[in-house]
Amino acid sequence: MQTSLIAVGKTTEPWIRDGLSLYNERLKHYTRYQWVEVPDVKPRPGKPDPARVKLDEALALEKHLAAVDHLILLDERGTSYDSVQFSKHIAQLQNRGLRHLAFVIGGPYGFDARIQSRAQGTWSLGPLTFSHQMIRVFAAEQLYRAHTVLKGEPYHHA
């Protein structure tokens, strides 16, 4: 199964890029994995129109979602899992014979309805609020952790 982690906007902080690089490389040992950054939408001069920004981001995201047959959006109102529950969820998706599973981290205004309507689920990393930059590393690490749990490796200590 192909697994993708897709984020709107460029990763700007060097320490976040380093963390992403670490987990992106580790994930490749467990699954066909791809990290994708969709360019930021440059708002028109003046006050940004959130609806327009979300629509422009949706159009950019759709180019990367054509082959995706199961889409999960990272959303603060999504389903929260502990790490073992999340690994079981990944296993259930793998057992369904999916070809391409994608997790998407949206922009600062969330997701346009055209992306929300394509999603089969949402995932929350908990009730705390994190920057869209930090979520990238947390999501990649949790994907990696889920795969190590499924393989019975000692990375996760229950």
Image (tube, rainbow, N blue to C red):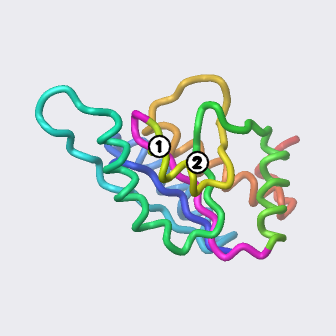
Report whether 103 appears left or right of 108: right
Which residue sits at x=72%, y=51%? 145
Element at label 1? loop
Label 2 and label 1: CA atoms lie apart by 8 Å
Residue at the outermost top position: 128
Amino acid type, callout 2: Leu
Observer-nearest residue: 90 or 46?
46
Above or below: residue 11 compared with residue 77:
below
Above or below: residue 15 compared with residue 47:
below
Location of the C terminus (image quadrant) = top right
Magenta region includes residue 100: yes
Report whether 6 appears left or right of 52: right
Label 2, on which residue? 73
Residue at the outermost left position: 45
Label 1, on which residue? 111
Who comes first in sequence, dot 2 or dot 1? Answer: 2
Dot 1 surroundings within 10 Å: few (below 14), some, or many (20 or more)?
Answer: many
Which residue sits at x=52%, y=39%? 135
**CB atoms of marks 2 and 1 within 8 Å:** yes
Nearer the camera: disc 2 or disc 1: 1
Magenta region includes residue 23: no
Residue 38 position in % (x across, y down): 36, 56
Dot 2 surroundings within 10 Å: few (below 14), some, or many (20 or more)?
Answer: many
Stretch in magenta: 97-109
Amino acid type, callout 1: Phe
